[in-house]
Amino acid sequence: MACYFRRSIASKLSRALGRSEDAFISALCAIPVSKKQQSPDFRLSVNTLLRNGILPTNGNLQAQTEALASQLKQDSVVEEIFAGRGVIHFRVSRNLLVQKVLEQLCQERHKFGVKSELFDGLKKGTTVVEFSSPNIAKKFHAGHLRSTIIGNFIANLKESLGNNVIRVNYLGDWGMQFGLLGAGFQLFGCQEKLKNNPLQHLFDVYVQVNKEAENNEVIGQAAREFFRQLEQQEHQAVLLWKQFREITVEEYQQVYKRLGVHFDIYSGESFHQQQAQEVVQQLQRQGLLKTTEKGTGVVDLSSAGDMSSYSTVLRSDGTSLYITRDLAAAIDRKERYNFDEMIYVTDKSQGIHFQQLFQILLAMGHSWAERCQHVPFGLVQGMKTRLGEVVFLEDVLDEARGRMLRNMSQSKTTKEMVYPEDTAEKVGISALIVQDFKGPLGSDYKFDWDRILQAQGDTGVFLQYTHARLCSYDEVLYQSVQDLQPKHLVNFLMTLRLRLFSGVCTVLANGMKILGITPVKKM
């Protein structure tokens, strides 16, 4: 508080005398005062100003002292002033000083946070973020948790800085695996089971058909045929595939709702199957498409043009590949959204894929590919529930909520809540997110429930605990008013602390929201 006042007085004197503000700061200080006094005591050394050449040495010292005292008297905060020879003592009004400090904080607030001058040169525009992107016809695998929460953080961060963010969930809804699933459902599927427990039934069918296909080439041939029918848009195959997709998206949305994640667009590889063929034709027209002895279509990525490095974009039977559809999707997004940057969030095993994707786009003449970025992340090791190895994300979320609910019920500081399960869910998810974000994204880390749910240390639980206690600080202040007699001091502390804690609480809550955490106010 004294620092704010010193700078305010120094600024006023420097403007009045046309001299450096720092020189006045060095001459102005707060000094210890008697315990009986109720306000800070400041001293301005005129001698220091003379030694530093701020005031002319040939002037009358007393006159110069009185002139500066006159300048200080104009400040509304100054309550009493004593001008001696070469030194000015003055006392300030505590209440007015607090008010002035708070006003100055409000005026300077725009200089901090996302409106800081650090971001003045940061170009704002449209950012496309592709994240999560699970495969349809399968329950949400726990392995997709990292992509989901990291992508959500990046989208929140870009949005908080003023970018127009487009959140894309690029579903894995095409490819030979759907040929296998389609063939498997025709052999082992049941519409009744699909209706009652859709993703579990599709998962069971997929496991069974994979097992059968290992020793039965007929099933492999049936899978290739089903995918060919999909590529050719044959009615029955497409109808079955659409059913799988709609069921999956509906269930995924329930998981995203629990995580507090939303998407602007649910896209997928299937959206770009026709465009993928157009990309192949364009590559051919540009002389970039080569055909190998096996009949596959490739793009030479070697610097010497000797095929020492290449990317396969077409199977020998003419069907598209994952990278072909990614090329089509990237071109389509640029045409639709005219983005300034595009960010892909996937595990680090796909690093080469994105490197090749950006290289091919550049070779095709798309200079905007330089503004595309892959954000890779490592693997989570040892994620288990009480029932054993984790397969599905819902199991992880249920486990986090259950463990947190037990911890809350055993804690003496837990407050009564109308919906304790809801709080336990939010805090449990916070714990998962903070554990994931504590280290470099590219690193693998070992999952440990006990460490994640600790109430102390750098954990999500402690972060939520801090926010909840800040939200309830008014109760502490109210109790102070009941117990303490020096009312002026209490009122001062109430005014100052409420503002400070309100500010801290707001920053904490905003930061948590960018991370993808929903702050709780009571726990």
Image (tube, rainbow, N blue to C red):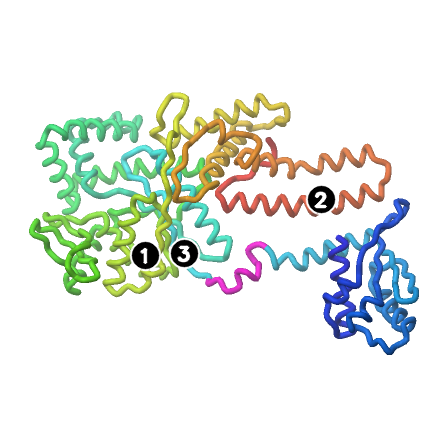
Using residue 336 as the reference point, say whether residue 515 is left or right of it: right
Which mark, by number, is residue 498?
2
Crowd class of label 1 (few under 14; some 14 to 19; many from 20; radius 10 Å):
few
Q: Earlier in the sequence, mark 2 or mark 3?
A: 3
- The magenta stretch is 113-123
* Label 3: how many Cα within 10 Å (few below 14, some 14–19, many 20+): many
Q: Earlier in the sequence, mark 1 or mark 3?
A: 3
Residue 114 magenta-highlighted = yes
Q: Residue furthest left?
A: 293
Q: At 84% across and 67% down in the image, what residue appears?
A: 47
Residue 120 on the magenta span: yes
What secondary structure is marked by label 2?
helix
Callout 2–callout 3 Cβ contact below 8 Å: no
Where residue 397 is drawn, which disc sits there?
Answer: none
Q: Residue furthest front?
A: 51
Which residue is label 3 attached to?
127
- Residue at 14 percent across and 39 percent down: it is 226
Amino acid tagged 2: Leu
Give the label, 2 or 1, closer to the camera: 2
Q: Nearer the viewer, residue 418 or 260?
A: 260
**Label 2 to label 3: alpha-carbon separation:** 38 Å
Quarter of the figure that contains the C terminus: top right
Q: Quadrant of residue 378?
A: top left
Is residue 177 toward the left or the right of residue 491 in the image? left
Q: Picture coordinates of residue 480 (x, y %)? A: 78, 35
**What x and y, as percent, mark residue 302?**
20, 58
Which residue lies under the disc numbered 1? 333
Badge 3 element? strand
Label 3 amino acid? Thr
Q: CA distance from mark 2 to mark 1?
A: 47 Å
- Residue 262 appears in the picture as rendered: no
Quadrant in the picture for residue 304: bottom left
